[in-house]
Image: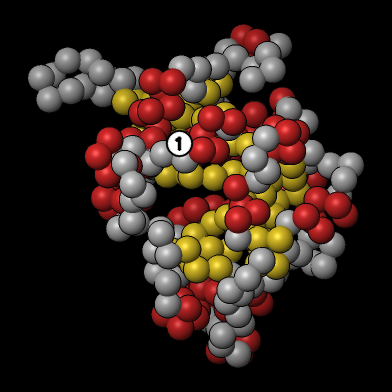
Amino acid sequence: MGGLPATLGRFGQFEVRLATTKQEIRKAQRLRFQVFYEEGGATPQQGAALIRRDICPFDAICDHLLVIDTEARNRFGRLKPKVVGTYRLLRGEVAQRRLGFYSQREFDIAPLLARHADKRFLELGRSCVHAKYRSKRVIELLWRGLWLYAKHHRIDVLIGCASLPGVNPLALALPLSFLHYQASAVNEWSVRPIAGRVEMAILDKAAVDLRRGIAALPPLLKAYLRVGARFGDGAVIDKQFGTTDVFTIMPLADIEERYVSYYGGPMEMPDSLVA
């Protein structure tokens, strides 16, 4: 973690922190299993269903951002803090030494990295929030923690896959077309799928109503759009998770003002981050 304190901030009963133990990572994996598999209908790989955790080789090389309800109680009424939100963070220098970026399984990002060899990339992944905690406060805490982490590590660009529910592109024609016409990355930042490219401009531009297009997006994609994210050229179907994935690009120099305006409100922070 390079000197960054584990606890990044607090707001009321919630704390945003980095996982420091295997037990905390397992709790994040259990939350991911609940959201992606039990709620979202993804197909678990061998063993995952038995242990009821979303397990992935990339977990071992990533940092894990957590939002914890410090006042949660178990069924016996005893205080038992609970992981209610998580983000998986993979820095470019770690990816280069180890497994590469997770998103390279679906998207050809080598040209993007080569064009911006002087920049530091951070891949965002496995983002989810417990169904009972999908409030503005919890999501904001995740994003504030992410911002502090990115600034500490001098990150220049946030990247990653973001998902639309379902594997039928025609059923997703409105949100995919909206992203293509309203938020496509310029050539300098554009990324294309490795194979199985799904055309995003399914509808004619004139047929895409802006209000309905935004309303058709999942909450995470709306949050990305809010801060000025741009998206690659083409989507990919992820059969395991039952989603259609798009590639997200957020150069921090382009989004900082909007990011701070949405997610830079007051939050209790450790002294080491205030100084």
Q: How many marks?
A: 1
Residue 58 appearing in the image: yes
Question: Which residue occupies 73% across, 28% down?
Answer: 153
In the picture, measured across the screen, residue 85 lies left or right of residue 271, that is: left
Which coloring applies here?
secondary structure
Q: Secondary structure at mark 1?
A: strand
In the picture, measured across the screen, residue 241 lies left or right of residue 108, that is: left
Q: Residue furthest left?
A: 76
User: Which amino acid type is marked by label 1?
Assistant: Thr
Q: Where is residue 239 shown, x and y percent of the image?
A: 42, 65
In the picture, measured across the screen, residue 116 lies left or right of residue 141, that is: right
In the rendered image of this protein, does residue 8 appear above or below residue 54?
above
Q: Where is residue 146 shown, x and y percent of the image?
A: 59, 34
Depth order, front residue of 272/153: 153
In the rendered image of this protein, does residue 161 appear above or below residue 58?
below
Mark 1 surroundings within 10 Å by alpha-carbon count, few (fewer than 14), some (14 through 19), many (20 or more): many
Question: Which residue occupies 74% across, 38% down?
Answer: 96
Q: Where is residue 193 shown, x and y percent of the image?
A: 65, 67
Question: What residue is pinned by disc 1?
Answer: 86
Task: Give the image quarter of residue 235.
Answer: bottom right
Task: Give the image quarter of residue 152.
Answer: top right
The C terminus lies in which quarter of the figure? top right
Depth order, front residue of 271/146: 146
Task: Give the image quarter of residue 70.
Answer: top left
Question: Which residue occupies 77% across, 31% down?
Answer: 154
Q: Where is residue 144 shown, x and y percent of the image?
A: 57, 33
